[in-house]
Amino acid sequence: MDKKVQNHEGCCTDDNLSGAYSGQQEIVIQPSMPAPVQDEVCCGAPPGPESNPFERPGYVLQRFVKDFVDTPVGPVPSIKTDLDRNDLFGKMAVRWGIHRDNYKVAPGLYCVGTPDQNAPVLVTANYKLTFDVFRKELGSIHAWILVLDTRGINVWCAAGKDLFSTTEVIQRVQLTGLAKIVRHRQLILPQLAATGVSAHRVKKASGFKVIWGPIRAKDINYFLKNDLNADDSMRRVTFAFRERLGLVPVELSHLVKPSLWVLLAIFLASGIGSHIFSVGVAWTRGLMATAAYAAGILAGALAAPALLPWIPVRSFALKGTITGFICGIGVILIFHAALQFWEVLALVFGTTAISSYLAMNFTGSTPFTSPSGVEKEMRKAIPLQALAVLIAAVSWIGSAFAK
Amino acid sequence: MEKFRYLPGVSTLELDVQACVGCGMCEIVCPHGVFLLENSKAKICDLDGCMECGACAKNCPTSAIRVTPGVGCANYIIQTWIKGKDAASCDSVECC
């Protein structure tokens, strides 16, 4: 079907497409008249290439689509397995929380290579980052890719929210007409989807047997070659240094907005004194308090996650308390000449409380904390964190009156 | 995941060995190797490794496994305290 396009342009649904493809009314696109290259007088640079024959009115042809493969249910996009610059920019952006909640691909059936009726069906989420990580590993594979509508959320989180769910798998299998494309009745799902998908229910409702694939996309090649068997290590989540650091930017990006309020409060609290309020004092003392706040963020959202396995306590709030206390002491050493006792107390308590709270919140980003455990430590930690903030605020404001 | 251990003795995971048919699904889906199949019956071999994700219970064909599943996320739990379990959402928490 290369260089061919069917002739009624208003096609929209899969049904229309399949009708058009099975019909006889295909026309060959004529090579366009090349524009004269030297003709730059009135219209600037020479024009770009002509439209891709796969373009359809009202649709955007995705950059990751290489080709379309004809199937009994219509053309299925064949996707590229190498990432381009846009994919990498997109990845960097979402790591910093930019466009993160709307970074997705259209759900439905795709393929890699030239799959036939016996090719495996790999199921994944429609978060573009997940989709990219996945297709990057499929260079030497011929397979059908069933992308579920997980609202642009990754496999595990979507499974936890019941979006990568039993119902979604069953519905997507039916909507795509998968049963007409493959002769076998097997779906390979990433293991972490098991939180949301009940294999025996999928089998009952759709006739497709769920095979639990490896956790990580990079193991899919091995899994397929090894008769659909994964080694134990492919079935265990990891949380290596690099994986933990990859989560830090998003954690930091969440802090931007609340930090504006915190800084305002710091500025106001720092200017209060026996002179009622002084902008000059607010500035000099405010800078020191801001440094303590920044140290708390550094300790709780960067140091604690990075050093996670090496901080010898299990409670995350306690891990943050340790890193926070050390960073608080660091701040004191920098400003010690300008500080009196109550100010030292305020800065150390402030830094430690912020760090403890942020480290505690990092539980949401880890792959091993149980909700029962998190709730248990929170019940103890939150009152103490609040008390520490109170002590910090009272000491900080009070010390200004002692001067 | 031996390097990462969280608070011990808190998991709500329970296994009814009588109801187990030994299909081994729990052993496959658990991301922390909590289950082990011994003499055609599942066994909880590392209860404290459990993060209560619920994958095992969801995929047990005879409902022999019980666990209160959830997300181990402080921010989410704070929301359930403030707004109640139904109104809390991960959307405003943005953890995942």
Image: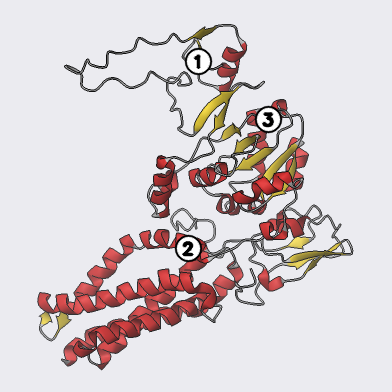
Distance from Cα at disc 3 to Cα at disc 1: 26 Å
The one of A140 and A369 positioned closer to us in this rendering: A140
Q: Quadrant of residue A184?
A: top right
| Cβ atoms under marks 2 and 3 closer than 8 Å | no
The one of B46 and B72 positioned closer to us in this rendering: B46
Mark 1 is on which residue type? Lys
Q: Nearer the viewer, mark 3 or mark 1?
A: 1
- According to the image, label 2 marks what residue? B79
- According to the image, label 3 marks what residue? A178
Q: Quadrant of residue B25?
A: bottom right
Residue at x-position 58% and y-position 68%: A369
Mark 3 is on which residue type? Leu
**Quarter in which the N terminus of chain A is drawn:** top right
Mark 2 is on which residue type? Gln
Tell me the chain of label 3: A
Residue that extends furthest to the front in the rendered view of this protein: A38
> Looking at the picture, how far across and down is residue B10, in whole percent?
65, 74
Residue at x-position 55% and y-position 71%: A374
Which callout, 3 or 1, points at the residue further toward the start of the chain? 1
Can see residue B80? no
Residue A99 placement, left or right of B19: left
- According to the image, label 1 marks what residue? A3
From this view, report whether residue A402 is shown above or below residue A21: below
Distance from Cα at disc 2 to Cα at disc 3: 40 Å
